[in-house]
C-alpha cells in the first residue's frame, strides 16, 4: 500500500497506524539494543523470563491500543515479557531501521513491516517462517480474508503474521450532492459516471472540488491506481516476471485522471500523507474522496453527513485494493523466537484482533473477527464501515516483489505528470514502463 501500502492533525492511516507526532529524539539510538536478553543465555533471564523486543512504530491511538494488549499478554503469560518500546522510529521508517539493525546484528524479535516491504525484508535468513504456526493456528487459515493470506505469503511460505487490514472505497458528502441536485452514487457505478459527477459537484465560486488525488508520487499516490488497472485486466507484474503488466491499461487509467485535471474537478494534494486533501473534504469543500476506514473517525468528527460506496468500475466488476501490513518475526535464538511467535499468534486471534481493529481503525483480519458481537456493534455504529468490510471479498493486494518499490515510484511519477499536465497519459506511461521494466530485470 503497500502500503501497503500507505497515508498526520488527522486520524488518517499514516497518523493512526503509521505516523503522527515524532517520538522523542533520544530513543532512536537506544532502540537497537534496549530490551535484548543475553544471547549467551538464549534470551532467557535469570528468573526464566524470556524478553521479546517489539518495534511497532505506532503513535497516538494505535500505540495506546497496542500497549493495552501487550500489558494483557504480559499479565497472562508470566514467563514472557514483551517490551513494546516501539523501535524509536515511526512505521514509515521501519524498513530502513530494520535493514540497518539486521546488518549490525542487533535487531528486534518482532517488527511492524509494511506489506509492500515484506519481500525486501524476507530475503534475510533471520526472518522466521510462520507457515506451520499460522496455517495450523487457532483461527483456521481459510478464515483469514484472501488479501491477508496473499500479503503474508511468499513462495508458498507464510513469512509474517498480519497486523492491519484496510480497503479503498469512495466516501461522499451527501450535503454537496443534495446542493448540486445529484443522486447519491450506488454500487456498480462507472468511472465515466464518477467523472461526470465530479464535474457537476465542482463549484469554483464556493471553492468546492469534485474529488481529490494525492500528487506527491509516493505510495499513497500509486496504490489508488491499481484497482483501476486490475479492473481493466492488467496486473502489476506481467506473467513473464520481466516487465510490467499494465502497459495498455495504465494509459487508460491515467486518461481518467487526465480528464479530472482537464475539468479542474480534482484537488491535487502536493503534500505527503494526503493530509491537505482530507482537510478539504473535512471542511465540506470536496464531494468525493477515495479513502479507507481509517479516515472515518475524522470525517465523523468534522460532522460531515457522509455515505460510502464501492469504487467505480470500467467493466462492472467489483474490485478494490487492500494494503495489509505485517508483524514480522526475527530469529534471536530459539527461546525468543518461540516467545515472539506465541505473542503474535495470540495478538491476531479474533478476541484481540477485534479490540485492536476497533481502536486502531483497521478492518477485521478474519471472518471469525467479523462475526464477533463487539465488531458487529462497532460496524453498526459507524456509518459506511460495512461497505469497506464487504469490499474485502473483491480486494486484491500488491505483489510481494522486491522490485515493487521501484515500480510504484515510476507509476507515481507518471500520475503526478498527468495530473499537472506535464505529460500525456501515453508519454507518462512510456517513461514509467522504461523505469519499472529496468527494475524488474535486476537479479534478486
Image (cartoon, helix red, strand yellow):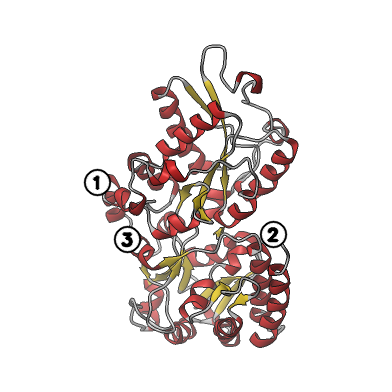
Q: Position of residue 23 (x, y in %)?
A: 64, 39
Q: Are marks 1 and 2 in contact (CB under 8 Å)?
A: no
Single out the mark in the foreground, 2 or 3: 2
State the image quarter where residue 313 is shown.
bottom left
Q: Secondary structure at mark 3?
A: helix
Q: Which disc number belongs to residue 373?
A: 1
Single out the mark in the foreground, 1 or 2: 2
Residue drawn at (50%, 31%) of the image: 338
Circle 2 is placed at which residue position?
444
Circle 3 is placed at which residue position?
386
Q: If you read the primary sequence from the N terminus, does the residue marked by circle 1 or circle 2 appear first?
A: 1
Q: If you read the primary sequence from the N terminus, does the residue marked by circle 2 or circle 3 appear first?
A: 3
Residue drawn at (66%, 43%) of the image: 98
Q: Secondary structure at mark 1?
A: helix
Tell me the quadrant of the picture where the N terminus can be found: bottom right
* Residue 192 in the figure: left or right of residue 217: left
Tell me the crowding category of disc 3: few under 14, some 14 to 19, or many 20 or more residues within 10 angstroms, Cα based.
some
Q: Are marks 3 and 1 in contact (CB under 8 Å)?
A: no
Residue drawn at (51%, 82%) of the image: 203
Image position of 369 with respect to 319: above or below: above
Q: Position of residue 352 (x, y in %)?
A: 37, 39
Image position of 72 with respect to 390: above or below: above
Tell me the crowding category of disc 2: few under 14, some 14 to 19, or many 20 or more residues within 10 angstroms, Cα based.
few
Tell me the crowding category of disc 1: few under 14, some 14 to 19, or many 20 or more residues within 10 angstroms, Cα based.
few
Q: Position of residue 296 (x, y in %)?
A: 42, 58
> Which residue is nearer to you in this view: 211 or 367?
367
Residue 254 appears in the figure = yes
> Which residue is nearer to you in this view: 55 or 122?
122
Amino acid at each position: 500500500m503497500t502500503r501497503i501500502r500507505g497515508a498526520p492533525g488527522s486520524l488518517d492511516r499514516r497518523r493512526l497506524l503509521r505516523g503522527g507526532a515524532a517520538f522523542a529524539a533520544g530513543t532512536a539510538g537506544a532502540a537497537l539494543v534496549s530490551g535484548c536478553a543475553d544471547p549467551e543465555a538464549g534470551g532467557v533471564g535469570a528468573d526464566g523470563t524470556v524478553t521479546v523486543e517489539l518495534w511497532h512504530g505506532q503513535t497516538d491511538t494505535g500505540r495506546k491500543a497496542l500497549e493495552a494488549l501487550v500489558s494483557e499478554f504480559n499479565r497472562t503469560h508470566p514467563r514472557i515479557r514483551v517490551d513494546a518500546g516501539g523501535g524509536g522510529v515511526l512505521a514509515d521508517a521501519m524498513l530502513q531501521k530494520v535493514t540497518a539493525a539486521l546488518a549490525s546484528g542487533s535487531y528486534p524479535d518482532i517488527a511492524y513491516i509494511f506489506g509492500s516491504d515484506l519481500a525486501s525484508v524476507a530475503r534475510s535468513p533471520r526472518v522466521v517462517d510462520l507457515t506451520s504456526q499460522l496455517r495450523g493456528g487457532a483461527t483456521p487459515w481459510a478464515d483469514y480474508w484472501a488479501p491477508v493470506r496473499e500479503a503474508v505469503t511468499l513462495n508458498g511460505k507464510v513469512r509474517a503474521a498480519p497486523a492491519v487490514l484496510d480497503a479503498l472505497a469512495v466516501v461522499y458528502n451527501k450535503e454537496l450532492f443534495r446542493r448540486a441536485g445529484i443522486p447519491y452514487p450506488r454500487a456498480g457505478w462507472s468511472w465515466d459516471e464518477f467523472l461526470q459527477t465530479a464535474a457537476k459537484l465542482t463549484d469554483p465560486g464556493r471553492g468546492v472540488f469534485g474529488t481529490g488525488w494525492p500528487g506527491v508520487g509516493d505510495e499513497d499516490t500509486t496504490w489508488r491506481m491499481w484497482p483501476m488497472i486490475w479492473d481493466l485486466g492488467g496486473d502489476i507484474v506481467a506473467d513473464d516476471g520481466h516487465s510490467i503488466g499494465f502497459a495498455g491499461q495504465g494509459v487508460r487509467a491515467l486518461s481518467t485522471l487526465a480528464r479530472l485535471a482537464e475539468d479542474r474537478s480534482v484537488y491535487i494534494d502536493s503534500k505527503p500523507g494526503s493530509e491537505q486533501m482530507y482537510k478539504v473534504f473535512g471542511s465540506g469543500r470536496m464531494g468525493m474522496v477515495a479513502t479507507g476506514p481509517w479516515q472515518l473517525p475524522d470525517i465523523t468528527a468534522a460532522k460531515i453527513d457522509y455515505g460510502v460506496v464501492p469504487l467505480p468500475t470500467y467493466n462492472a466488476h467489483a474490485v478494490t485494493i487492500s494494503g495489509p501490513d505485517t508483524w514480522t518475526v526475527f530469529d534471536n535464538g530459539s527461546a525468543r523466537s518461540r516467545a515472539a511467535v506465541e505473542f503474535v499468534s495470540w495478538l491476531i486471534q479474533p478476541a484481540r484482533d477485534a479490540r485492536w481493529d476497533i481502536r486502531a481503525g483497521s478492518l477485521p483480519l478474519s471472518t471469525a473477527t467479523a462475526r464477533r458481537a463487539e465488531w458487529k456493534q462497532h460496524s453498526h455504529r459507524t456509518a459506511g464501515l460495512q461497505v469497506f468490510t464487504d469490499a474485502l471479498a473483491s480486494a486484491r493486494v500488491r505483489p510481494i516483489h522486491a522490485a515493487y518499490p521501484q515500480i510504484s515510484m515510476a507509476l507515481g511519477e507518471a500520475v503526478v505528470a498527468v495530473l499537472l499536465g506535464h505529460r500525456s497519459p501515453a508519454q507518462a506511461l512510456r517513461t514509467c514502463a522504461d523505469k519499472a521494466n529496468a527494475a524488474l530485470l535486476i537479479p534478486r
